[in-house]
Image (cartoon, rainbow, N blue to C red):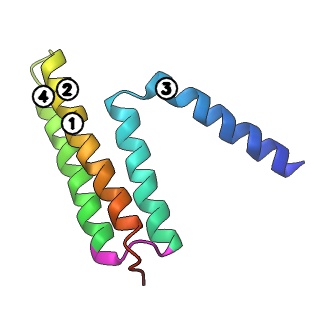
Amino acid sequence: MKRIILAIAAIGTLVATPAVAGVNGRQHNQRDRIAQGWRSGELTPRETYRLGRQQYRIGRTEARMRSDGHFSYRERARLHARQDRASARIYAKKHNRRGW
């Protein structure tokens, strides 16, 4: 019974993700990927720190872009490009066969 409930919750999360898959949704997803990599041992402490710091800087950039009350298409595109690069970096670090 627990497995069924967990499976339904996981599917619900996946289905709900595109609705919030904007900038904040991606940020949250990438932080979860980093935390999962740390817990599983796929990421070293140093890699975890650096990836987390990169996500922090992306969050600060987003806050700066939104600070004037207008979040333009061009700003959003730049932020998504940074998140794409960060996502690729997370993948590379999780699959580089270094662990602790």
- Residue position for label 1: 81
* Type of the residue with mark 3: Pro
Upstream in sequence: badge 2 or badge 4: 4
Q: Residue at x 42, y 29 (%)?
A: 21
Q: Which residues are magenta?
A: 41-46
Marked residue nearer the N-terminal end (2 or 3): 3
Amino acid type, residue under disc 1 in the picture = Ala
Q: Which residue is mark 2?
A: 77
Element under disc 1: helix
Q: Give me the residue at 39% from left, 72% from top.
A: 43
Q: Secondary structure at mark 3?
A: helix
The tag on residue 65 is: 4
Which of the two labelled residues, at mark 1 and mark 3, occupies the earlier sequence position? 3
- Residue 39: x and y in percent read 51, 70
Quadrant housing residue 94? bottom left
Q: CA distance from mark 2 to mark 3?
A: 17 Å
Kindly report the distance in space between the C-alpha atoms of the residues bearing marks 1 and 3: 18 Å
Q: How many residues crowd mark 1 within 10 Å: few (<14), some (14–19), many (20+)?
A: few
Tell me if mark 3 has few (under 14), some (14-19) or many (20+) residues whose alpha carbon lies within 10 angstroms of its own.
few
Q: Main secondary structure of the magenta part?
A: loop
Q: Report how far apart the C-alphas of labels 4 and 3 lie in the structure.
A: 22 Å
Check disc 3 and report the residue beneath it: 18
Q: Considering the numbered disc 2 on the image, is that residue within a helix, a strand or a loop?
A: helix
**Coordinates of residue 23 in the picture (x, y in percent):** 31, 31
